[in-house]
Image: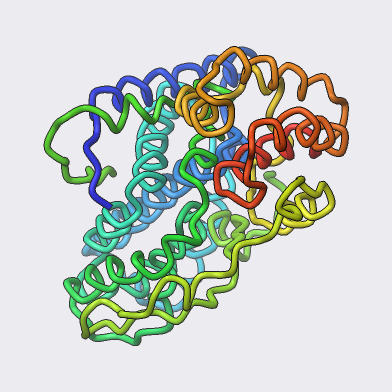
Amino acid sequence: MTVQINSNYLENYSSEYARLVCDRFFSSRQFITGQDIIQLTSSTQVNFFIIKRLFELWQEELGKLKSNPYFDYRDIAVHEALTQFMNVLSRRIKVERSNLEPLVKVAVKHAVEVATDPVAFYQSEINKAPQGKINEYLKENKKYYKWHDKAVVFLIDKTGFGHDKDSYLRAVAANYQVVKDSFESVNLLLATLGDVKAFDLDQYLNEETDRPTVPIQENNTAATDSSFFEEVEASQPPQSTPPPTMDGPAPKASVESVAPPKASFGNGVKLDASKLKSHFASESYRGMVGILGELSESLALNQRFMFTKELFDGNADLLRHALKSIDEAGSFDSAVELINTRYVSELSWEPNSDVVREFMQLVYRKYSD
């Protein structure tokens, strides 16, 4: 996916986001723990990218210890003792604000990059892997990939070893063409940042500049036989799409032959609340459910533009009135009834369209716990 991006906007946004998050968390606390970081923001991907960077620093610390030439780190007793020490250390994450804020900033930048250009992001991840150990690197880090992970996790344990980096890079690009229609909406992913600061996707994508290369950045009573990082919760959906071959050209299968069929949300005339709830409840939107307050306050600018244009005949006042009415509906079922009565028929909505699905996903998130 080729995009023109405003790198200055992303730099300023991620800095401000990190500042606001730290203002909120450290208002009454001096340190943050690993468990706190997992739940730091409403964006699961941001949280897990912070943990990923801590994992990298943890590995670097182990590497420094093993680099000492005067001791035998291959000795079994030393190995076991060192493993236990590192596992205990991983459970003593204790970060002050001055050290957390830059980690949050980089995590936000990476989250935006993977949401808007997953091919470039995951290719940068492959480029970071040690030579000949790409599979091990991806397997080790897959628990931290929460957005658009289908672009890369198919490589793990499916293609064997011995392939050079160029083959992996080509495979990611080819696989993206096969599975992209099953990806989550970019707007929905970025909306999880909105409880801290709304992200303006239009401003980020609309600057006419050369496309840059994605930068490569760099409870205490638990058992100690494993590390904190091994126990970080992973929620990857099963991979059902057959991957493209590593050595050949991009697959020629049509998207329709591999992408799951679109769900039906109504009878062509009205939205069906039961079908919507069943569909949204089955999706893996970790960190997305129940995080919205007032819809009228929660939409990012790009969502307002899209809904105004596609659903409300270009009338921004009509959208604002609709959001206020939905906020006052009291329940998801009541909101769906209101939407059917006032908007689906009157404005000729297509209940099974992508834009209606995205709008209703937000309504569902508001009324789900």
Image coordinates of residue 154 in percent, x first then y, are 43, 74
Q: Relative to 150, say whether 31 is above or below.
A: above
Q: Relative to 341, say whether 110 is above or below.
A: below
In the image, farthest residue toward the left: 210
Residue at point 61% right, 22% down?
A: 298
Residue at point 42% right, 61% down?
A: 180
Image coordinates of residue 350 in percent, x first then y, are 62, 46
Q: Relative to 194, say whether 279 is above or below.
A: below
- The image quadrant of residue 65 is bottom left
Nearest the viewer among 239 and 186 is: 186
- The image quadrant of residue 64 is bottom left
Image coordinates of residue 234 in percent, x first then y, are 59, 60
Judge left or right: residue 358 versus residue 218: right
Residue at point 84% right, 52% down?
A: 274
Image coordinates of residue 183 in percent, x first then y, are 48, 57
Judge left or right: residue 5 versus residue 364: left
Q: How is the image coloured?
A: rainbow
Nearest the viewer among 364 and 284 is: 364
Nearest the viewer among 193 and 31 is: 193
Nearest the viewer among 113 and 268 is: 268
Residue at point 32% right, 58% down?
A: 122
Question: Image quadrant for the C terminus?
Answer: top right
What is the tally of numbered marks visible in this picture?
0
